[in-house]
Image (spheres, grey):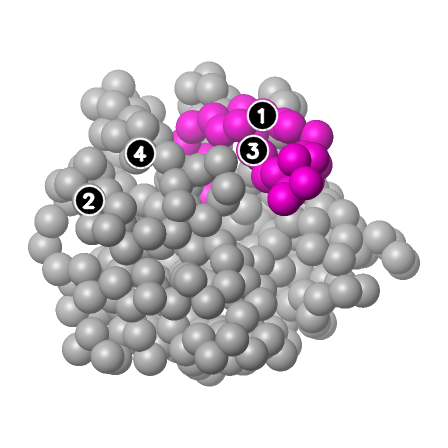
Amino acid sequence: MARQDKAILTCALTGVLTDPRQHPVPVTPAQMAAEARDACNAGAAILHVHLRDQRPGMGHLPSWDPDVAADVVGAIQAACPGVIINLTTGVVGPDVSGPIACIRRIRPEIAACNAGSLNYLKIRDNGQWAWPPMMFDNPVAKIQQMLDVMAETGTHPEFECFDVGIVRSVAMYRQAGLFSGVPKLNFVMGVASGMPCDADLLALLPRYAPPDALWQTTLIGRAEIWPVHQKTAELGGMLRTGLEDSFYLPDGERAGGNGAMIEALAACAQRAGRSVASPGEARALLGLRAAAPGTAAA
């Protein structure tokens, strides 16, 4: 797999359930737009967007309201003309009507496609589960539904890979005709029951991806993530961070917002001798077709 000279930076702006009363995550369209502007000014070409419930006091919960999606993405696009939107799709259970409705409304250039199932676990030092054990279920039939609507809307899938077997599955999905085009794989490392955030493991993962794939890492954790971000940059991978993934800068200080996180990520790329890709350069690398102006807010 050839090493790319350009590094695409993605900012994951807010995440799924992080409580805005405890952490500085954006919720409203205006807050999302302000954080997006800071991230883009620091070098982000792609913004990974989760949607939050806009009702007062409910911003710690996700939303699949297409009107919320249109308001949030419209505000981001007004603040960051030309940026690439990457919309979340992750849901537990077989009902994918919410993500499908949002994809059809927004028609994002990229959307996440969770590429396999995972027992989503975390255990405390006292032996108690941090939350009741749950299955993040992504069987092939569910993946097919997501990929079908992405093909319908001209949306490029980003395959979220939580374990090595999921990485290996992506080539099979293409061989079976579930998708076409440049595969974009996201190695998610640091979930307690998934792949650890480990530079030695990372060095092995690209060999299990399709040979023409672009890959990136999503690293969950604190100080331990930054050496692996640096290894990603050195190996030629694409880079992602943001308040969804961590609150901590390389020096251990808490980040006040997404802009500071992306500045640190851009420094990783620069130390590896790579320049940061513009949105246009990212589109060329991924073979994207930019959406018509105003489509997402229609």
Residue behind mark 1: 135
Say which residue label 4 marks: 164
Give the residues in magenta: 109-137
The residue lying toward the viewer, choosing from 228 and 267, is 228
Residue receiving disc 3? 120
First along the sequence among labels 1 and 2: 1
SS for dot 3 = strand
Taking the spot 35% from the left edge, 30% from the top edge, the residue there is 166
CA separation, marks 2 and 3? 23 Å
Residue type at mark 2 is: Leu
Instruction: State whether residue 199 appears in this view.
Output: yes
* Residue position for label 2: 204
Residue 124 on the magenta segment:
yes
- List x then y, in percent, for residue 179: 31, 30
Up-down relation of residue 72 to residue 139 (above or below):
below
Horizontally, is 26 left or right of 157 in the view? right
Residue 109 appears in the rendering: no
Question: In the image, what residue type sits under mark 3?
Answer: Tyr
Residue 285, image x, y percentages: 23, 58
**Amino acid type shown at disc 4:** Val
**Left or right: where 160 falls relative to 213:** right
Badge 2: residue crowd in 10 Å (few <14, some 14–19, many ≥20): few
Rendering coords of residue 116 (x, y %): 43, 28
Image-quadrant location for residue 254:
bottom right
- Above or below for 188 versus 229: above
Q: Position of residue 158 (x, y in %)?
A: 38, 44
Residue at image coords 49%, 54%: 220
Q: Are marks 1 and 4 in contact (CB under 8 Å)?
A: no
